[in-house]
Image (cartoon, rainbow, N blue to C red):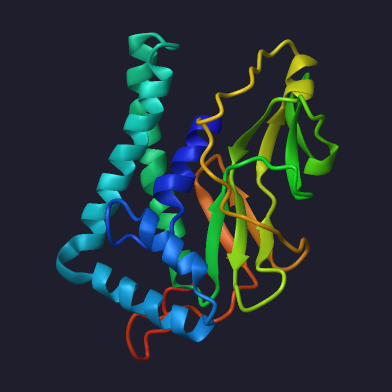
Amino acid sequence: MAVIAQALEEYILTPNYLIEEDDELRYILRSLVDAPRKNSLRSLLLLASEEADRKEKVKRSRVSASVEDITQTLEPLLPAELLTRLTAELEQELKNATSEWEPVQRYQSHYEVNATVSRTPWDWKSVSFTDDGFSLSDVNSAAFAEDEAVLVVFPRVCALDRSKRPTFTAVYPGIVLQKSQAATKGCGLQQPPGDAIPEAAVEADMPGAGAAVVQSEGSSTEMGEASQATGTSEGEAGENKPE
């Protein structure tokens, strides 16, 4: 799940589906302070992605890249038959995720995700294993031990507006797996290499603003209390806002 979380952040849960690799574009959108100007740019980007079926091609490319990254990591760990079956199921779930996230790209609010653990005092959902499966409990990153291995298994979701303070407003806390929790059920969790997790996209947040339901199983994402959607043409704003 930690590997999938990183793939979701990099390829799937992005501000638009216009180009296959959009790191520089995401950096520009994150940096803009003038919110109306940024929303105008986002609208143009969304409109451009609709030409010549470009968006669908990019979505397919993003899903393919996600699957490749994930399977390369898992290949040494799983039998070939299991890996083949997992790859097929994973590809379909990632396709579902792109479809569920696409309307979020059109909200007036600019949403970004983060799959990086930091000592910044952020709220997370921590996985605790039980005899019946697992449960989620609230935890603040300030409570993590300095030497504790913590893996993000589903990214945080934040609304980004650099014209406000704080800049980032958390709408979904994200899910983590702590070594201390995994050890209680005999699960091995090693500290990931330093270059395994990308640079944090989130600097600060204000918990409690907005609502979100993000289900990692079933690939369903609904952003709550979002304002009017960012339209791609005049009169189109709001048409693609999820119910």
- Please identify the residue farthest to the bottom as the structure is shown: 235
Quarter of the image that includes the N terminus: top right
Q: Position of residue 161 (x, y in %)?
A: 59, 73
- Kindly identify the residue that appears in the image at 38 percent across and 78 percent down: 41
In the figure, 186 relative to 143: above or below? above
Question: Residue 222: which quarter of the image?
Answer: bottom right
Question: Residue 138: which quarter of the image?
Answer: top right
The foreground one among 164 and 47 is: 164
Tell me: 100 left or right of 190. Answer: left
Q: Position of residue 5 (x, y in %)?
A: 52, 39
- Please identify the residue farthest to the right as the structure is shown: 143
In the figure, 187 relative to 215: above or below? above
- Kindly identify the residue that appears in the image at 60 percent across and 55 percent down: 157
In the figure, 124 relative to 108: above or below? above
- Kindly identify the residue that appears in the image at 43 percent across and 46 percent down: 10
Tell me: 181 left or right of 23. Answer: right
Q: Position of residue 14 (x, y in %)?
A: 43, 56
Residue 139 seen in the figure: no
